[in-house]
Amino acid sequence: MDRIPAIRRAILADVPPLKALGWSAVAVAVPTVLRGSFDAGMTGVPFTMYYPAVLLTALLLGWRWAVGVAVVAGVVANRLFLGDPDAFELGLAGLLPEAMFALSCAVLIVSGEMCRRLVRQLEAAKARETLLNEELLHRVKNMFATVNALATMTARHSPPDAYPAALAGRMRALLKATELLGVDERAHCQLHRLVDNALAPFRTTGNFVAEGPDCELPREACVPLSLALHELCTNAAKYGALSRPEGQVTLLWTIGEGAEDLLRLSWREAGGPRCEKPTRVGMGTRLLRSQHGLGKVDVSFEPDGLRCEIEIAGVEPAVPSLGKAA
């Protein structure tokens, strides 16, 4: 299919119902006209011309439309090319060809639908591969930027003799936060643990305030939220509040505002350089958006610092415990 881009695009296209209905009508009309133009349907198998139309319909429009084309074609061929056009032929002479036509169409429809699904699955796999490659590259670039930022922050807040141990500790914390990104999507995760692991590599004295009740996140929200917090921390360390000694990030969250199982997180940066909206959309922007697991993500680039609001539905409150300011 890759060698015939037009067919590939046609298979991948989502055809509107009205347009699909028109193409289905053409798929019946064209073979009928062609069959009648040869010998008025007086000799040969009356259904021969309809087979390519049924197969193409299954391939380009899907099996449902192909079944419709096959049924209508069978009725039209029966009336026009089997016996008296004014009487619907139900005798053995009419039923046997109809049965063979139905069986042949079933095989063609299944074959066309399987080919259609295979092409679409291959296209989806290619899209996933591209996205994964982009995310991997983004992760690697972010990791280098994060290590550089951590080394700078550690040197800023640690005496020379304590620098190696402090940096090693931050590298271990970064490893824990990175491991959390691969958490089993079938498992729940505690919000406090997720937040602590995400913020730990970037913490220095007084640069974070993180407070809110503990809860268990739904399984589909664990990895997306961890990625989002890691992205916010990385951006803050490279361009935002965490890039300056006096910068500070406030992360607050509540449960039950608007809905009993709704979690609202608020990220606020202050004390950093003037915040400006980026001119291009990268992988980081894709991570900070509404997606499966994150019901709402609003990012605003205020002059005094980045703001981000995240909402997650379906949380399960745990034993209330306030996070400690850092």
Image (spheres, helix red, strand yellow):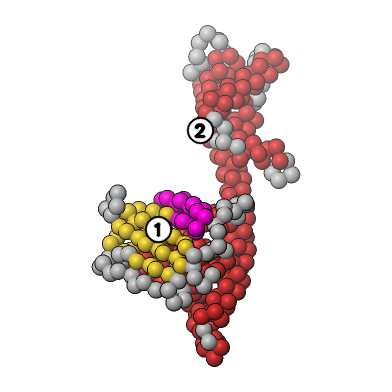
Whether residue 302 is situated above or below residue 8 in the rendered picture: below
The residue sitting at 55% across, 62% down in the picture is 273
Residue closer to the observer: 95 or 28: 28
Which callout, 1 or 2, points at the residue further toward the start of the chain? Answer: 2
Q: Is residue 110 visible?
A: yes
Residue closer to the observer: 153 or 231: 153
Screen quadrant of the N terminus: top right
The residue at the far bottom in this view is 161
The residue sitting at 63% across, 33% down in the picture is 56
Q: Is residue 186 visible?
A: no
The residue at the far right in this view is 3
Q: Circle 1 sits on which residue?
A: 266
> Is there a contact, CB below 8 Å, between mark 1 and mark 2?
no
The residues bearing labels 1 and 2 have C-alpha atoms spaced at a distance of 47 Å
Which amino acid is tagged 2? Arg
Give x and y (percent) for residue 264.
36, 56
Screen quadrant of the C terminus: bottom left
In the figure, is residue 68 to the left or right of 27? left
Start and end of the magenta stretch? Answer: 289-308
Q: Report the mark closest to the observer, 1 or 2.
A: 1
Give x and y (percent) for residue 34.
68, 19
Q: Secondary structure at mark 1?
A: strand
Which amino acid is tagged 1? Ser
Was residue 129 drawn as part of the magenta stretch in this picture?
no
